[in-house]
Image (cartoon, rainbow, N blue to C red):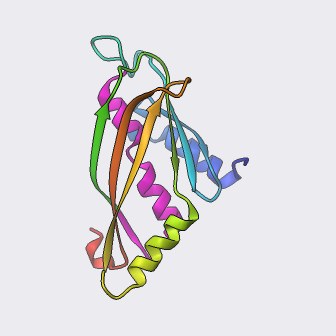
Amino acid sequence: MLESARARLYRVGFNLFPAYRGTGARVTHIEPDWTEVRVKLPLNWRTKNYVGTIFGGSMYAAVDPFYMMMLLKNLGDDYVVWDREAEIRFKKPGRETLYATFTIPDEEIEAIRAELAAAETDSVDRHYTVELVDEDGIVHATVRKTVYVTTDRSKGA
């Protein structure tokens, strides 16, 4: 699906935002409904470490904000969303451009809403995994994110 003008504006904004720009990564696509985001992390002078592979910090920073942003965009203003935990597993040195694709299906969004609508809980933790892969689909790193979601605005800050 083609990007909408608004999604394109967000993509450009991410790529110009100093904190994200410093990662060396670039957002290459945002679905208009924020159910998919794609990122590209090239091996270049900005991302290369001492031994000539992609710096692990660049790998993590390239994927850091997206699940939180995707949930914020899909759940709306009645929800508070925060990153709670992250874990990265390095599997192979990044000696070439790496790619990550983030997806959150509509069923996941509805499951979060349903769980929070139930009287038993006022917050949920959701776990998401994204892989940094090369052009051949070989996994170089796996990042697992835990995202906290609540409807209680007093717990947001």
Where is residue 78, by image quadrant? bottom left
Q: Position of residue 19 (x, y in %)?
A: 38, 40
Residue positioned most to the bottom: 119
Q: Say which quadrant the C terminus sits in.
A: bottom left
Q: Position of residue 68 (x, y in %)?
A: 41, 57
Left or right relative to 115: residue 123: left
In reply to whether residue 68 is colored magenta, the answer given is yes
Task: Tell me if I can see residue 89 in this picture.
Answer: yes
Residue positioned most to the top: 51
Q: Residue at x 57, y 56 (%)?
A: 35
Q: How many marks?
A: 0
In reply to whether residue 11 is colored magenta, the answer given is no
Identify which residue, 67 or 12, lies in the foreground: 67
Residue positioned most to the right: 2
Where is residue 53, by image quadrant? top left
Q: Residue at x 46, y 79 (%)?
A: 114
Task: Tell me if I can see residue 76 in this picture.
Answer: no
Where is residue 147, by image quadrant? bottom left
Identify which residue, 93 or 7, lies in the foreground: 93
Identify which residue, 6 or 136, lies in the foreground: 136
Left or right relative to 18: residue 16: right
Left or right relative to 48: residue 14: right
Identify which residue, 122 or 78, lies in the foreground: 122
Which portion, as a residue range, is magenta? 54-81
Q: Residue at x 34, y 50 (%)?
A: 145
Q: Name the main secondary structure of what is drawn in magenta.
A: helix
Q: Residue at x 31, y 28 (%)?
A: 56
Q: Position of residue 8 (x, y in %)?
A: 64, 47
Query: Does residue 155 sit above or below 89 in this rendering?
Result: below
